[in-house]
Amino acid sequence: MNINVEHQPNCRAVLHIEMPADVIKQERAAILNTYAAQARIPGYRPGKVPASVIEKRYKDAVDGELQNRLINRGCYTAIQKENLEVIQVLSVRDTKLADDGTFTFTAEVSTAPKFELPDYKGIPVKLERVVVTDHDVDHEIFHLRERQQQFDDVERPAALGDAVVLNYVAKMDGQPLEETHPDLPVHFRKIEGNWFLLDAEEDFLPGFYAGLVGISKDESRELTIGLPTDFHNEVLKGKNIELAVTCTSVKQKRLPELNDDFAKKLLGEEATMETLRKEVEASVRQRREQGRESSLANQVLGFLHDKLDFELPAEVVEREAQNRANDLAMRAARQGMPEDDIIKHQDEILSTANQQARQNVRLSFILSQIADKEQLEVSDAQLSVALSQIAARSKQSPKKFMAEAQRNGTVNRLRENLRIENAVDFLKQNAVIEDVDPVTEAHGCEFEKAEAKA
């Protein structure tokens, strides 16, 4: 068998294969024998039909099966001989059975990238120590109180931090947006009885909240909002919109008292402030330990990703990018982004998805090679637990789910995913960790603002 391999960019290879006449005869004879053993033709006993009769009667089927066998055999031999790690056969073309009995064809395949692993044991990482102070507990409890806050009507002008209940109609160039642009999100057109919490740092329209400071119940105002040229809505970029606003109520936030009753409301009748503080401390500690673990994984993966740069199979990247893009679009929809806005941002979504896909695919190949080198395997118990968890999330019986998973290939995909996870765990266990003091991050929340004023 003559084999010629052309290596191309993006992990592709073109195989030019010529199979000798004796191989073709051998394969054809085997196919004819199978047909002869199974054929039921009048005038001939089962298994005694001459090859010439079979050849004539089933010529198209024999030729088709012969070509499939030759292609499979030729590709397999070429892959083994050239030591290719083929991910996918992309196309087969130029098939030809020559007069001299030889068979030639060309196959284009996608191959796994080749690269040399760096030293992946002892990757240096820096991790923040897990420390939870009384200040951290106070901060967390403040936010728990915020989630239980109430709003009381007040008979005074609104200030930042208050909530106002508004009706308004928006116009542009003197024309109501409700009429001229009915496809705009509703909050840009007309609002009735909506609450707005006045926060200068979270203004959904630049200058809108500032224009409401000092407004009182039953007061009306005319506001003109100039939108920047990079405003996220295409229709409104660089435009001025006029808002005819009426305030129907001004409300002041009221946090619940910090006492045992507050603790009981959160944790049950047996709770006290002491037990609440212990629960909060444990929760913060667990969250920070999880963050430390996540940082450890991110740093070892980042180390490997930055150390290695190699070509990737375009088909694998495209498939992963499409999955990432679908996930990003669905997440945007769940967060309330209108479908029109998602379509307008599709180029940005695709760009982000492609970048993420390339990172994921590169790391997947690196981790798979580490798993091979370290002979990391997935135990039956590990696989069984993972399958049971997926079955529980999908609300199927484990027995039914596992039977279906065997048929549709889920088991093999999950086993490979778990093997990759085992490789990440191996890297984490072998990393060299330097503990550093935690960095306090400012979030600009009300708790921090109150501290700054104190």
Image (spheres, rainbow, N blue to C red):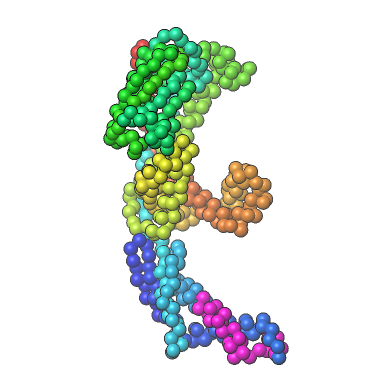
Magenta stretch, main secondary structure, is: helix
Q: Quadrant of the N terminus?
A: bottom left
Vertical comparison of 80 with 285: above or below: below
Q: Confirm whether residue 125 shows in the render.
A: yes
> Residue drawn 44% across and 38% down?
338
Vertical comparison of 245 with 293: above or below: above
Q: Between residues 6 and 436, which one lies in front from this camera angle?
A: 6
Vertical comparison of 16 with 152: above or below: below
Give residue 104's position: percent from left, percent from top.
Answer: 42, 80
Q: Confirm whether residue 370 shows in the render.
A: no
Give residue 377's position: percent from left, percent from top.
Answer: 53, 54
> Residue drawn 44% across and 22% down?
167
Give residue 341's position: percent from left, percent from top.
Answer: 40, 40
Q: Between residues 357 and 248, which one lies in front from this camera angle?
A: 248
Q: Which image quadrant is residue 166 in?
A: top left
Counting labels gives 0
Q: Please check the rendered image and state whether residue 36 is part of the magenta-colored stretch, yes or no.
A: no
Vertical comparison of 274 with 440: above or below: above
Q: Between residues 13 and 233, which one lies in front from this camera angle?
A: 233
Give residue 267's position: percent from left, percent from top.
Answer: 59, 21
> Which residue, as the protein is rendered here, is positioned at the far top?
155
Q: In the rendered structure, which segment of residues is drawn in magenta?
A: 44-68
